[in-house]
Amino acid sequence: MLKETFVKLVSAYTDDSVLINDLWEEVETAHSGAKRHYHTLRHLENLLLQLQAVKDQIQHWDAILFTLYYHDIVYNPLKDNNEEKSAELAVARLRTLGVPAELVQRCQQRILATKKHLFNTDPDTNYFTDADLSVLGQDWPLYSAYAEGVRKEYSIYPDLIYKPGRKKVLQHFLQMDRIFKTDYFYSMLETSAKRNLQKELEGL
């Protein structure tokens, strides 16, 4: 479903089958790296499922899909500019496809919004960032697998360094008035997300 959705999306802007295949292979390869344990194709698949559930609430569906495929395409745990680099690459690829400038800008802005997941005046952005965080509110086994994946991605750091940093992230979310900005994701996942975050924090 992930590849089929991508091909259908990109095919609306080009009929160059070689380009379409090259773009998909770039996305697939980037998310299949040996050092990726959470930010993988499976993460994209989950995002797609979450967003399809609210598709009737999304105003600019193509922009949301482009954001989905490119928001983590550059990912290096040692860097703090992954969102900026991902946005840059997305802009370049969308311009190659001849995507309208307004849509390119929307995609760029939404990728950058995943850096802090704050409330945004644009409803589509809130739906995307909520979907991106939806793993926080899943059943504990799924959440635990997510947390383990993140730890593996940061395996270069010993616990002495990783745990304080992770605790800071968890406390940041727990101190937010609400993690999820949209009523849909808030009502469905907020309580379980807070519970999962607290449980992980207590286990560190």
Image (tube, rainbow, N blue to C red):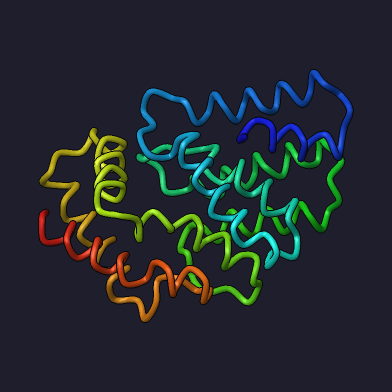
The residue positioned farthest toward the bottom in the image shown: 177
| Quadrant containing the N terminus in the rendered view | top right
Q: Residue furthest top?
A: 18
Q: At 57% across and 68% down in the image, what residue appears? A: 126
- Residue 2 falls left or right of residue 15: left
163 lies above or below 125: above
Q: Is residue 58 left or right of residue 191?
A: right
Q: Measured from the top left, where is residue 111 in percent x and y?
A: 59, 53
Front-lying residue, 143 or 160: 143
Q: Quadrant of the C terminus?
A: bottom left
Is 104 or 56 nearer to us in this picture? 56
Residue at left offset 69%, top offset 36%: 6
User: From what the image shows, is residue 162 above or below residue 7?
Assistant: below
The picture places residue 191, in percent across and down from the top left corner, at 31, 72
Does residue 163 sit above or below 189 in this rendering? Answer: above
Find residue 18 and report its horizontal and vertical position in percent: 79, 18
Res. 120 image quadrant? bottom right
The x and y percentages for residue 193 are 32, 65
Q: Residue at x 45, y 63 (%)?
A: 116
